[in-house]
Amino acid sequence: MTEAEGRKPQSDEAQGTFDPEITSEFAIPQGLAAPKGPRGQKGGGESETTSEFAVPEGLDVGQPAGAEPEGSAFSLPRTYSARHAPPAFTPAEGFPLVSLTKDVPWQDRMRTMLRMPVAERPAPEPPPKAEEGGPAVPRVLDLTLRIGELLLAGGEGAEDVEAAMFAVCRSYGLDRCEPNVTFTLLSISYQPSLVEDPVTASRTVRRRGTDYTRLAAVFHLVDDLSDPETHISLEESYRRLAEMRRNRHPYPTWVLTSASGLLAGAASVLVGGDLVVFVAAAIGAMLGDRLAWLCAGRGLPEFYQFLVAAMPPAAIGVALTLAHVEVKASAVITGGLFALLPGRALVAGVQDGLTGFYITAAARLLEVMYFFVGIVVGVLLMLYLGVQLGAHLNPDADLGITKRPLWQIGASMLLSLTFAVLLQQERATVLAVTLNGGVAWSVYGAMHYAGGISPVASTAVAAGVVGLFGQLLSRYRFASALPYTTAAIGPLLPGSATYFGLLAIAQNEVDAGLVSLTKAAALAMAIAIGVNLGSEISRLFLRVGSAEKRRAAKRTRGF
């Protein structure tokens, strides 16, 4: 073959005379008949037999008369029989009935609806309040987020914040809404219908502050919005929120500092101190409070504020030991620790974990851990310095808290009262929480000292009584339960176990120190679980107040 003949096929291909069907990998080989199309023609369209969902040739599947095609997503399977239906979807006894009575506070009603699946929630369409045609959806969502921000920043649990946000949205006719609360982020989504796009808004909580007076005012606003006979417009709600933010705290700074000193003094008496110990613990706590205020004014994080506040009580206790003054230095230091232990954040964190908000619970407990580490570092610095200077601090000292039960009960009530002042509670709630604190210590003392029951079990039962009474009082006043429970658990906080654990670590007895700190952690968890359990028991079995009484009370007060 010559070179010209060898190049001839290439020239033919280059000129476009080559048939592409012969070289195509999808072409039918020679000698194989091509399948006919639906009209009996070659290549008459895509063959139905190439579909992976097609019924194989020769298999006839009968369809009942009037039934949809087999491929429909809404048609019943061929093997389905109404008489012999499998019990896989709905049990014979049906779904449990959820009670949504109107005679319970709005917190319980909203919490019950939030715990239901979205598809099973009743969604009545109430008429819009105070505005014809309904308010603008973005403004309602913004108001809801602002209310949730105040509640979350004030220390409310995540489930209670979601219930309040859900109640606000439903009061303005937004039924298909989904609130979502985490430790620092609030978001809410509203979808008008299944075919419309959802509207979503979010808000970040950057600052937290303890003001239970403002918290109670927010609860009153949500309660008024949830009342079907109270019509509050968006403008009125915004005005009330602005007043809450502008209002100053109910107690001045010097009252808060004095309350911190009295709290530490009462705690020192609670663990066996006398008058000298009371004064020393009060002075140390007030110095620590002033130093913490100074650090806060300089913009230092709360970790360093707790660290600095823990140093003066420990320093005074070490100084009294070095001066050979016949006082119980351990009671002085323990009293100072009582004023710093973050019981409020601990209870809120455990409550979020028990109610299923694990991310928020983990964040709260991590915050508690940081605060506790700050206290540990501040106290350990002073204890280590005292040990190096020759102070003889005995980690096995007996605080002798069983000899004066009447003094202990009085000290526990004073501790709860001053704790309530530090939490900026309303003056009307201080007396109730003071009595609740006295009852808590009485139950603990009767079980632990008189009955010989372990301190963890005694603490859990006493905290359960606090949660039960706090929930009853909150239902009676239609307010938050935090002002009635947080301050009342003050006498139960593990101050002595924390101090002895830190002292053992400062004296190089790490094993004994870890055992004592583990006991303190167990007591703290018992407090949190007891408070939550008492609250849940009151919700399950008790009915305090009703909607009719609440409406009558509002008319009486002129609302």
Image (cartoon, grey):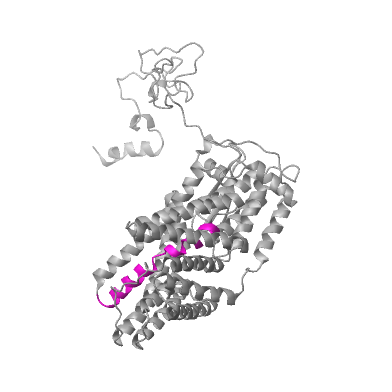
Residue 83 sits inside the magenta stretch:
no
**292 with respect to 196 (left or right):** left
Predominant SS along the magenta part:
helix
Q: Nearer the viewer, residue 92 or 277?
A: 277
Can you say whether 328 is above or below 483 in the image? below
- Across and down, in percent, residue 220 comes to 64, 53
In which quadrant will I find the N terminus? top left
Q: Is residue 48 visible?
A: yes
Can you say whether 403 is above or below 280 in the image? above
Can you say whether 203 is above or below 58 in the image? below
Q: Residue at x 46, y 15 (%)?
A: 39
Residue 503 sits inside the magenta stretch:
yes
Q: Nearer the viewer, residue 294 or 61?
A: 294
Can you tell which quarter of the image residue 78 is in? top left
Q: Is residue 142 visible?
A: no
- Across and down, in percent, residue 511 comes to 24, 69
- Across and down, in percent, residue 22 comes to 34, 29
Can you tell which quarter of the image residue 321 is in? bottom left
Q: Residue at x 32, y 37 (%)?
A: 8
Q: Give the tally of numbered discs.
A: 0
- Across and down, in percent, residue 148 comes to 58, 55
Q: Residue at x 32, y 36 (%)?
A: 9
The magenta stretch is 482-508
Can you tell which quarter of the image residue 33 is in? top left
**405 with respect to 237 (left or right):** left
